Image: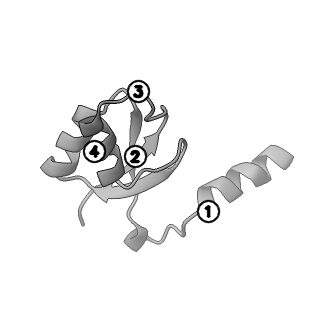
Amino acid sequence: MAKKLKVTLVRSIIGLSPKQEATVHALGLRHIRQVVEHDDTPTIRGMISHVVFAVQVTEGRGAAEGEPSGSRKKAERSEAKS
């Protein structure tokens, strides 16, 4: 199974160069705090390295491992209520 990376946009793309803005869009990020998941490949790592100041990267589990989308947020909300 290929490793997965969760990439989150943490900085606005306003003020970025056109190439950096295009890289962020190519990663599938459109809004601040939007999270996308990609395979851990050299291509994706290279794209991330060009905009490392605008994104946050964490290693994530793949959807094939049984993690339904949004389950982490739901669990965090239920823990916060307790």
Which of discs 3 and 1 lies nearer the camera? The answer is 3
Quick one: SS at disc 1?
helix
Which of discs 1 and 4 lies nearer the camera? The answer is 4
Residue holding disc 2: 7
Q: Amino acid at mark 1?
A: Ser
Write the residue at 42% across / 50% down.
Answer: 29
Residue 82 visible in image: no
Quick one: SS at disc 3?
loop
Q: Earlier in the sequence, mark 2 or mark 1?
A: 2
Residue holding disc 1: 71
Write the residue at 23% across / 62% down.
Answer: 2
Q: Residue furthest left?
A: 42
Q: Amino acid at mark 2?
A: Val
Write the residue at 15% across / 50% down.
Answer: 43
Q: How many residues crowd around disc 2 within 10 Å: few (fewer than 14), some, or many (20 or more)?
A: many
Q: How many marks?
A: 4
- The percent coordinates of residue 71 (x first, y second) are 61, 62
Q: Amino acid at mark 4?
A: Thr
Q: Residue furthest right?
A: 82
Residue holding disc 4: 23
Quadrant position of the N terminus in the picture: bottom left
Please say which color scheme the image uses.
Answer: one colour
Quick one: SS at disc 4?
helix
Horizontally, residue 19 falls left or right of residue 69, namely left
CA gap, disc 4 to disc 3?
14 Å
Horizontally, residue 37 falls left or right of residue 82, namely left
CA gap, disc 2 to disc 1?
17 Å
Quadrant assignment, res 22: top left
